[in-house]
């Protein structure tokens, strides 16, 4: 069966990458195959997860390349070399320019740990998102998977899932619940949905 070629962009621990790998193994993802992991950090544990599952990886460092343009030119090269159909941002902590997102319109998706449009955009990443939700006092939060365009966290929404905030939550306990009850479920489901659409057009 023809499959969409997926790359997962990571920066850190890679628990969402792990959820995608597990979903591929269990058949939740059947229309695509993760062929490449790209990290913008050399020490990311996500790279070990890729190696453990014999998935090829590339480290692309903005600092070494000197500019956003050079960073994105290298990313583009890597995507072309590997004939990538879909880019999944899974804890990728670098903002991509409009030039880059236009080139891959409807071919980049991202998981964000809140119900967009709450607690999103510049400055809202990782634990900061959950700090924001707790400081505001919301009783429900969640996660969103969306297409990526030039506006940080501003692209069309693909899936969302709500998660309860509980008394006594810390940013860490809330992050864990949002990952377990929302991110690790809707990111693989959305990936399968978009891959299915891509192979229909292939
Ligand atoms: C996840 O909660 C992801 O949603 C978030 O960072 C964490 C990465 O964890 N992403 C963002 O905040 C992007 N704006 P992981 O490396 O274990 O998947």
Image (spheres, rainbow, N blue to C red):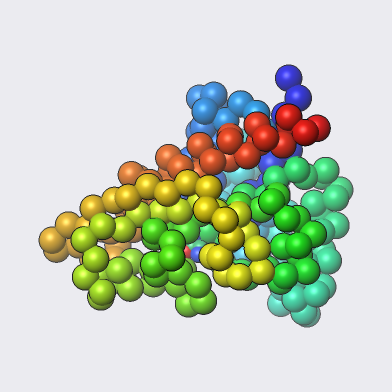
- Residue at x-position 21% and y-position 61%: 139
Q: Quadrant of residue 184?
A: top left
Residue 71 on image: x %, y %? 77, 70
Relative to 180, say whether 63 is above or below. below
Give left or right: position of 66 versus 133.
Answer: right
Location of residue 153 in the rendering, given as x and y in whole percent from the top left corner = 54, 65
Where residue 90 appears, as percent x and y from the top left, is 55, 53
The image quarter in which residue 36 lies: top right
| 193 relative to 78, above or below | above
Asked if residue 27 can be seen in this view, the reply is yes
Q: Which residue is the extreme one toward the left?
A: 167
| Residue 197 or residue 126, whichever sits in front | 197
Residue plotted at (79% across, 59% down): 103
Is residue 12 in sight in this rendering?
A: no
Query: Where's the C terminus, which quadrant?
Result: top right
Q: Is residue 126 above or below residue 58?
A: below
Q: Residue furthest front?
A: 156
Q: Count all numbered tags in the image, as a single digit.
A: 0
Q: Nearer the viewer, residue 118 or 176?
A: 118
Outermost residue to the top? 1
> Residue placed at 51% from the left, 76% from the top?
122
Q: Is residue 116 left or right of residue 51?
A: left
Q: Position of residue 171 (x, y in %)?
A: 29, 66
State which quarter of the image contains the N terminus. top right
Viewer-nearest residue: 14 or 100: 100
Residue located 53% across and 47% down the image: 158
């Amino acid at each position: 069966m023809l499959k969409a070629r997926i790359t997962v962009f990571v920066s850190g621990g890679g628990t969402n990458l792990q959820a995608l790998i597990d979903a591929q193994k269990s058949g939740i993802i059947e229309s695509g195959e993760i062929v490449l992991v790209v990290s913008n950090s050399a020490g990311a544990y996500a790279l070990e997860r890729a190696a453990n599952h014999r998935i090829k990886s590339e480290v692309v460092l903005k600092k070494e390349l000197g500019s956003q343009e050079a960073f994105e030119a290298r990313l583009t090269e890597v995507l072309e070399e590997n004939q990538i159909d879909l880019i999944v941002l899974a804890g990728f902590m670098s903002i991509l320019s409009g030039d880059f997102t236009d080139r891959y319109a409807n071919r980049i998706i991202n998981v964000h740990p809140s119900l967009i449009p709450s607690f999103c955009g510049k400055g809202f990443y990782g634990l900061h998102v959950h700090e924001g939700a707790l400081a505001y006092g919301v009783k429900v939060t969640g996660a969103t998977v969306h297409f990526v365009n030039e506006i940080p966290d501003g692209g069309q929404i693909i899936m969302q899932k709500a998660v309860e905030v509980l008394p006594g939550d810390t940013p860490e306990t809330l992050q864990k619940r949002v990952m377990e009850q929302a991110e690790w479920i809707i990111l693989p489901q959305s990936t399968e949905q978009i891959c299915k659409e891509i192979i229909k057009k292939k």
